[in-house]
Image (tube, rainbow, N blue to C red):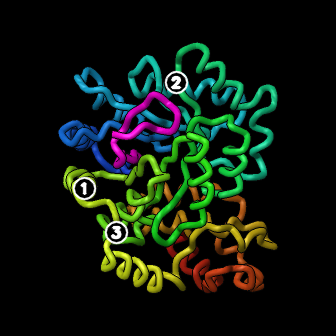
């Protein structure tokens, strides 16, 4: 068990990511929760945006003689919307108090407005005062957002993608750890691009400045496999480091790290988001959810005019124009 930042929450360093619960039945979710208990995995992360995930998890943990640490999150940015979502989450998760409530997927252009009167942060503070939530966190794919959040010291935890091929958040994770802000890692398998699960998780667990990693799991067997990494020596061996370097090299020209150096796009396409949704479709098997999100976008991969400016700015020399064509072909079938 490890203390999450400066909170009074003590959690196993491998937690449970609730995104894939969307594609299983309530019965399957019950089995997954039972397996978490068997393996003493006590940290569960879900979200209002994950369709049935909160509800299924709430049904599964109700009346269990086991204390889970529950984290969820909302994409609502205004006061009334966040206030409503907190109450929905409490009802879905069937708990009197949510341990950690997070602002979900915050963008750099909206960050400062979150703290204005009548905006989401005010609702979170009120919910904390009322005893509905215990701690406040923030999640983002953008390193600058997380850096600002750490500097402002308004959040108890931060959550960011981090894995052996997406290391752009390393310095902010160290900074958060120095300030005793809890560090939660999402996308440990790089959206399914990393297939050696145990090595991918060990890479993250080997970092002392990381509190918990939350791989998404939808099968009992995955829980056993993922938790087993804690049985090994945490320090990476030379052979494992060599293997990691080889994986990085192989993925170098075809994997978006979501660093956002390609932005802004002249056509206002959110380039990394196109690849993220394509990954959800092809690697996470969340086809319907990914297509629905894609269809809601004002600008899509197919709107690319192939100017090539994004490729000039990409530090990984990705063939972004071809990758956008591929994303459009998959998501616009």
Distance from disc 2 to disc 3, alpha carbons, whole Å, reads 35 Å
Distance from disc 1 to disc 3, alpha carbons, whole Å, reads 22 Å
- Density class for disc 1 (Cα within 10 Å; few <14, some 14-19, many ≥20) is some
Q: Which of marks 2 and 1 is in front?
A: 2
Position in image of residue 296 (x %, y %): 63, 55
Point out which mark residue 222 bears.
1
Point out which mark residue 19 bears.
none
Mark 2, residue position: 134
Instruction: Please say whether residue 192 is visible from this viewpoint.
Output: yes
Residue found 58% across the figure and 35% down from its top: 156
Q: Nearer the viewer, mark 1 or mark 3?
A: 3
Mark 3, residue position: 236
Numbered disc 2: secondary structure: strand
Residue found 46% across the figure and 59% down from its top: 187
Farthest residue toward the top? 130
Q: Confirm whether the magenta stretch covers residue 8.
A: yes
What is the magenta range?
Answer: 1-19
Total labels: the figure holds 3
Residue 16 versus residue 282 in the image, above or below? above
Residue found 44% across the figure and 85% down from its top: 250
Ranked by sequence position, the earlier of labels 1 and 3 is: 1
């Amino acid at each position: 068990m490890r203390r999450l930042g400066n909170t009074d929450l003590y959690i196993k360093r491998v937690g449970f990511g609730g995104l894939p619960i969307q594609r299983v039945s309530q019965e399957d979710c019950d089995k997954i929760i039972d397996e978490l208990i068997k393996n003493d995995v006590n940290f569960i992360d879900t979200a209002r945006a994950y369709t049935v995930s909160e509800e299924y998890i709430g049904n599964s943990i109700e009346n269990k003689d086991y204390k889970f640490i529950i984290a969820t999150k909302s994409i609502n940015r205004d006061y009334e919307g966040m206030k409503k979502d907190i109450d929905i989450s409490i009802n879905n998760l069937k708990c009197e108090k949510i341990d950690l409530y997070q602002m979900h997927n915050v963008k750099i252009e909206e960050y400062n407005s979150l703290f204005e009167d009548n905006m989401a942060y005010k609702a979170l503070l009120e919910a904390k005062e009322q005893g509905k939530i215990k701690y406040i966190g923030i999640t983002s794919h953008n390193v600058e957002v997380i850096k600002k959040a750490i500097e402002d010291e308004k959040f108890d935890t931060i959550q960011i993608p981090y894995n052996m091929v997406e290391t752009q958040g390393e310095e902010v994770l160290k900074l958060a750890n120095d300030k005793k802000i809890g560090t939660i890692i999402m996308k440990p398998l790089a959206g399914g691009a990393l297939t050696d699960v145990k090595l991918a998780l060990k890479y993250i667990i080997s970092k002392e400045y990381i509190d918990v990693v939350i791989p998404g799991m939808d099968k009992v067997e995955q829980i056993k496999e993922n938790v087993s990494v804690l049985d090994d020596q945490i320090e990476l061996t030379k052979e494992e480091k060599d293997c990691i370097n080889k994986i990085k090299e192989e993925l170098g020209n075809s994997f978006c790290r979501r660093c956002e150096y390609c932005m802004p796009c002249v056509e206002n396409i959110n380039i990394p988001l196109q690849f993220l949704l394509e990954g959800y479709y092809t690697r996470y098997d969340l086809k319907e959810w990914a297509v629905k999100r894609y269809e809601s976008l004002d600008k899509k991969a197919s709107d690319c005019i192939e100017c090539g400016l994004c490729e000039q700015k990409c530090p990984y020399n990705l063939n972004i124009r071809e990758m956008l064509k591929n994303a459009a072909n998959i998501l616009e079938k």
